[in-house]
Every structure is written in structure tokens, then in C-alpha cells.
Amino acid sequence: MRVTFVSNYISHHQIPFCEAMYERLGEEYAFVELMPMEEERRKMGWEEAKPPYVRRLYEEEAQGLQDGPVRQLIRDCDILLFGGMDREELVYERLLSNRPVIRISESIYKDGRWKAVSPRGLLHKYQEFTRWRKAPCYLLCAGAYVAGDFELIGAFPDRKYTWGYFPPLVRYGSEEELFGRKHPEDPGAVRILWTGRFVDFKHIEMMAELIRMVRERYVPEHPEQKICFEIIGSGAEEEALRSEFGDSVEFTGFLPADQVRPHMERADLLVFTSDRGEGWGAVVNEAMNSGCAVVASHAAGAVRSLIRDDINGRIYTFGDREDLYRKVTGLLADPERIRQLGAAAYRTILEEWNAQEAADRLLALCACILDNRSFDAPAEGPMSRAVSDRKCSG
């Protein structure tokens, strides 16, 4: 089975899945980059990797080759995974010849579904997606709102599956080993972590408001409890926040992704405050893998895919600061519940939401497509049937 994955460029979020696919398919698997990595991403610590399965279409095209070996990989593979949104002709070429395409998409209406009523937008979406509704074209929904977005435009009927991102999986010898890493120098404390860039859709101001509310309302009633806040990241608001909170909050500044994990291992809770502009949010995967009890906004793409409320984390209503406060302080008052949610979160990543499991499940769908068999989708996790949030309560 020849599988080619086309996307803008390979990132550290995609490499574990690609490695799993390469382990299973060897030279029959390729990842095609459409463009070089932006300088901004490099400055953020993203490395421009080139594993043996990576091919670069943009280099081939710069040489004037219109039908070179990389273009042939895209055209002639058995299954095309397509995550690039700006090279639709690569998809059309296959679908016109009735060859299978599996598209991967985050939400297409991050700024609001009101755009779905725009005549110009609808025409564009029809050309890009809806007109292929009867073709062998499938959708992997990288976020809880993707299925609902595509349902609005009538695309991919009965061919939408749950998907996401799969950061590196860390396996610990035991849960006791994992939880033994939680701030051993101060075992009686509760550590609460927030990490991310200080950009609008991540809403660092919600974390700041939570800290104020905990200090003003919760701490006076629980003076014996030690609570430690840590913020990893930087941006325009950093100086003002440092000035306001002083030494009561640890400001770590910007760290590359691989250096954040040890801080997650020390933390008890991770607070995730993003809105729908966060198409996924791999921080949630990483924190769950690190045994954190995650308290997360319902609006971010990853949250309803990864978290089952009060089973392996807690979900609060985005923008509702009182709900966030209740969800966090409810856990502060019950440290054993923090441990239970963190353990369940770790098992979710270990057993279900990881690159190895995702690759196996995706290849099962690929085999069914090629053999013209029905796919028995798992009940939960990657490759389960994607349910439209428009049909869900809450």
C-alpha cells in the first residue's frame, strides 16, 4: 500500500505519526512538503527536519519539473492524505480519475459559522469540497468543530472521522513513577500551569483573572494550602503581569516545546484557555501525557475530542470566568481528585490518543477503501465517527 501525505511542511506535531506510518510501510510511505518552513516558526524553536520519507515538491518545481518524481508520488499513490489547503489541483487530479483522497482539516470557520452563508464563500467551498461528495474522498476532522463545519456545506456525508495531532508519547515505567515527578521538593503544594504564546486566541487574560480570583476568594478561606502558579510563554502582556503578580507567580518565559514537558511533569493542573481560533491545541495532549488534570475551555478544537468531562479532565464554558474558577477550585479542595483525573488523562494518551494507535486505525480505513469494504470505526478516539457539535448538547 503506497500512502503519500501532502502538507505545507513537516512539524514536530506530525513527526511521531509519520514515523509510525514509516515503520509500517517503509519506502511505500512519503511526506511531501509544499513550502519551506516560515522563519517565524524557526524562531519559535521548530526544527526543519528531513527524515528519509520527506520529499519537497517546492524544490522540484523550482527546478522547472512539472511532472517530476515527487509529483508522481502524489498522482500515483494508492491513498493520498492531503493537509495542504492551497494546492487544490493536486486533489482534483486524483479525484477526476476516481482515486482515493483522505483530507485532513481543522475548523474552516474559526471566526464564526456566519461565513457559511456568504455566497462567495459557499461557491468556493462547493468547488473545493462539496462537489466531490460522491467521489472517494474522506475527511479526518482535526478538532471537535470540524464535522459540524462541513455538515453545513453538505460535504463528506458519512465519511468524516475523528482526528487530531499526536505529539511524542512519553511512556513512564508506572503511574507511581509519573506522579513521583510532581514537585517532589514540595509534595504538599498544588502546582497550576499555563503555557502558550500570548496571542489573542489563547487568552492569557483569563489565566490572570483566575489567579486574581483564587488569591482573593479561595486562599483566604484555605490559608494552609500552598498553591503555586507558573506561566510559560511571552508577549506584550508579560511585563504588566510580572509587575502585578511579582514573586507569587513563576514566569518562565518562552521555551521550545521539548523543554516544556518537564514543567508539565511537575504540574498538577494545566489550565487551557483558548477559544475556537485554536484549531487543535497539542498542549492538551502533552499535559495529559504528563499526568496533569487539565481544566480546558470547551471552545478549543482538541478539548471535546480528548477530554471526557470529569472523567479524564474538566471542561469549562469559554469566557465564563466563574465556571473556570469553580472547576479549578473544586479540584484544589480535592487533591485526590486531581490525581485521579491526571491518571485517567495519562491512560487516555497511552492507550488511545497516540501516533502508533492512530497509524494502525488509519491504515485499517485505507485497506477498507482499497478493498471496497465497509470500515468498522472504533467507538472512541482516532478514526471514530466524527459527530457534529451541532447535534450535541452543551
Image (cartoon, helix red, strand yellow):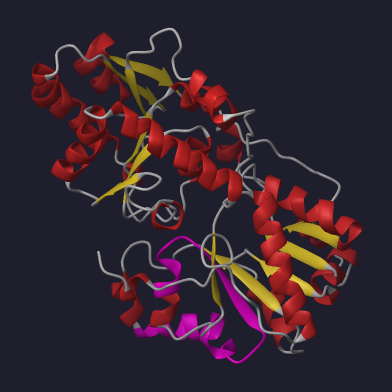
Quarter holding the N terminus is: bottom right
Comparing 336 with 321, the one in front is 336
Where residue 48 sits, quadrant-wise, is top right
The residue at the point 38 percent across, 13 percent down is 187
- Does the stretch in magenta take in 134? yes
Comparing 334 with 22, the one in front is 334
User: Is 52 situated left or right of 121 in this image?
Assistant: right
Q: Position of residue 106 (x, y in %)?
A: 49, 62
Number of marks drawn: 0
Comparing 154 with 305, the one in front is 305
Quarter holding the C terminus is: bottom left
The residue at the point 50 percent across, 44 percent down is 282
Where residue 249 sits, quadrant-wise, is top left
Where residue 153 sits, quadrant-wise, is bottom left
Q: Position of residue 271 (x, y in %)?
A: 33, 36
The residue at the point 81 percent across, 44 percent down is 51
Q: Which residues are magenta?
A: 119-148
Q: Is residue 176 above or below residue 78?
A: above
Q: Is residue 386 above or below residue 55?
A: below
User: Is residue 283 among the parts visible in the rendering?
Assistant: no
- Does the stretch in magenta take in 310? no
Q: Position of residue 356 (x, y in %)?
A: 70, 51
Q: Position of residue 316 (x, y in %)?
A: 25, 48
